[in-house]
Structures are given as C-alpha cells and as structure tokens.
C-alpha cells in the first residue's frame, strides 16, 4: 500500500500550497494569468534539473505528445482553481476536488477496464458526499453551494482526464519520464501568460517581492506534490488514488482553522456553530471513505 502513503504525502504538500495560494490570490494577485505565469519559471528550473538527474525515456513520438497533455491540462485547471480560490474560502474550495473522483471513476471504467469491489465504490461515494457537505453554506433563511462549484467542476474534470492519461502511459513508460514530459507541457503552456504579463509581474516584484517568493514557495510545494503523486498513481488504481487524495480537504481544513484562530490576519475562515458541525460531519465521511478504499 505504498501508493496510499505517497498520496497522503502529496496531499499535504498541496494543502500547504493551497493555504499560500489563498493568502496571495485573496490579498495580492487577483489576476490568475499572472499567478500562473509567475509559476512557470521555477517549474522550468525543476524540470531541467530532473532531466539532468534522471533522464527521460520516450518510447515514441506518440507517447511524448500524449505525455505533454496532462501538463497543458494542469495549466488550464490552475487558471480555474485561481478563480475559485479568490471567490471562496479555501476549506470550501478544495473539497470540490471530490468531483474528480466521479470523472476518474467513469473514465477508468470505460478506458482502463478497472473493476472494483462494492466496498471501494462505497468509499468513493462517502468521500464525494463528504466533499459536498463541506462545500455547502447553510443560512437560517436558505442554503447554497459554494459559488466556486462551477470552476472546481471544470478543474476536477481536467485533472481526471490527466490522471487517466498518466495511468495509461504507465503501462509503457516509467513514472519519472511521464512526470518530466508532463512538466514540459505545463511549462510551455504556463510560459504564455508569463510573457503576456511580464510588465505587471515586474511591477509586483518591485512593489513587494515577498509576494513573488510566496508564489514560488507555493509552486515548489505543488511541484513536490505532483512528483510524489505521479509515482502513487502509477502504482495504484487511478480512481482509488484520486479518491484518496480527497483527504487533502481534511488537511486544508485543519491548517486553515488553526491559522484563522491564531493568525487571523493571514487567513480567516468561518468556524462557528452549524458550520463546524457540517465540516466535522464531512470530515468523518471522508475519513471513513479513505479507509474503505485503502483496505
């Protein structure tokens, strides 16, 4: 079950990155194209280092082109994610990655012929239901789902396609080569908004370079998470790995709540009454679901 531990490590890297993203996007960089563009430079550096250290094995031009797709889809997904994180609490945005489980399950069943036990399907369902509960906003007069729902539905669909492609490639390529080529696709696609917004990025750096450093730290954590996650998904089932990574929402909730209590100037979440109850219920469902898919 090494893929379970690898997935949990990846989601913790992402959880810390999510907190940083919320702080920077919510308070400093509202333009998602600028945020994505800034992240292209360190990603380029990491990718070059990986190529030099590990090398890349490419079975054919077809596999190379297919391996670029997850990186391009990741760039598009991050643009949507940035819009969602700006519009809503981070602890309500991240659980909506649960939608990706549905997409991945369908794609894995159709294209990869993956078949699972009833217990594992139940675990996936519990994880998805928990993610919906945690994103639901209750008020005395009415209730509504997070306004970030649509953005994250798009994000989840794009990531689901990416993970299934990675799983498909893992039958013919090693996980590091898949990851490196995917990162090349990400760098190329993310470099476009960097060039288009170079003047604004320069102004941000001159005005407050700490914001740039925070963005770079977030990118580094995201990179580590992807590196570990590609290894996990190549060893385990695409649908089950994607379901387990919903525990990212649990870690985000814990970290966001602690920061809201002790350092509210950085991040402020709703942590009262029925909201806490709903979030605790959601976390319980997610923990049970995670257990079911990992046994």
Image (spheres, grey):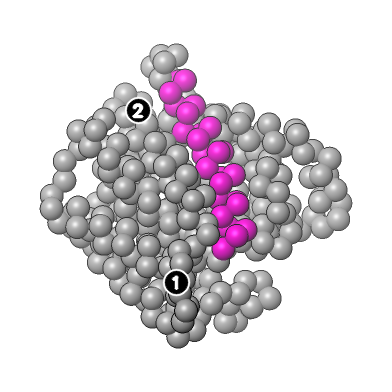
Residue 26 image-quadrant placement: bottom right
Q: Residue at x 40, y 20 (%)?
A: 63
* Closer to viewer: mark 2 or mark 1: 1
* Other residues around mark 2 within 10 Å, as few (<14) / some (14–19) / many (≥20): some
As drawn, is 39 to the left or to the right of 228? right
Q: Is residue 105 above or below residue 165?
A: below
Where residue 220 appears, as percent x and y from the top left, is 59, 49
Point out residue 205 in the picture as x, y percentages from the top left corner: 81, 50
Name the image quarter holding residue 294.
bottom left
**Residue 127 percent across, percent down from the top left:** 30, 60
Q: Which residue is mark 2?
A: 169
- Residue at the image position 42 percent from the left and 42 percent from the top: 157
Tell me the chief SS of the magenta region: helix
**Residue at horizontal 40%, vertical 74%?**
279
Task: Give me the disc on residue 12.
Answer: none
Q: Is residue 56 visible?
A: yes
Magenta stretch bounds: 64-88
Which residue in the protein does label 1 denote?
Answer: 143
Name the residue at 41% across, 15% down: 62
Distance from Cα at disc 2 to Cα at disc 1: 43 Å
> In the rendered structure, which disc, 2 or 1, sits on the residue that comes first in sequence?
1
SS at mark 2 in the image: helix
Q: Is residue 39 magenta?
A: no
Would residue 241 be seen by someone viewing this image from the given angle? Answer: no
Residue in front for this viewpoint, 146 or 187: 146
- Out of 271 and 195, give the one closest to the viewer: 271
């Amino acid at each position: 079950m090494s893929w379970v531990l690898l997935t949990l490590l990846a989601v913790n890297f992402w959880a810390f990155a999510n907190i940083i993203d919320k702080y920077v996007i919510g308070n400093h960089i509202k333009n998602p194209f600028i945020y994505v563009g800034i992240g292209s430079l360190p990603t380029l550096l990491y990718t070059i280092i990986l190529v030099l250290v590990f090398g890349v094995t490419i079975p054919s031009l077809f596999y190379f082109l297919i391996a670029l797709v997850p990186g391009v889809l990741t760039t598009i997904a991050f643009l949507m994610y940035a819009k969602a994180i700006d519009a809503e609490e981070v602890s309500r945005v991240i659980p909506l990655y649960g939608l990706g489980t549905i997409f991945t399950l369908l794609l894995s069943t159709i294209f990869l012929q993956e078949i699972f036990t009833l217990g594992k399907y139940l675990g996936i369902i519990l994880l998805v239901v928990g993610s919906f509960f945690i994103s639901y906003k209750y008020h005395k007069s009415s209730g509504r789902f997070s306004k970030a729902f649509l953005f994250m539905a798009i994000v989840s669909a794009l990531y689901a396609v990416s993970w299934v492609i990675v799983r498909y490639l893992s039958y013919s390529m090693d996980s590091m080569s898949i990851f490196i080529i995917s990162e090349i696709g990400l760098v190329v696609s993310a470099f476009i908004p960097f060039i288009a917004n170079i003047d604004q990025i320069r102004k941000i750096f001159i005005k407050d370079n700490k914001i740039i450093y925070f963005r770079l730290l977030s990118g580094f954590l995201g990179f580590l998470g992807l590196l570990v996650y590609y290894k996990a998904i190549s060893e385990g089932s695409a649908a089950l790995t994607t379901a387990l990574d919903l525990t990212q929402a649990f870690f985000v909730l814990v970290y966001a709540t602690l920061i809201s209590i002790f350092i509210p100037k950085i991040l402020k979440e709703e942590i009262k009454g029925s909201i806490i109850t709903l979030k605790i219920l959601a976390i319980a469902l997610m923990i049970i679901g995670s257990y079911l898919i990992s046994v």
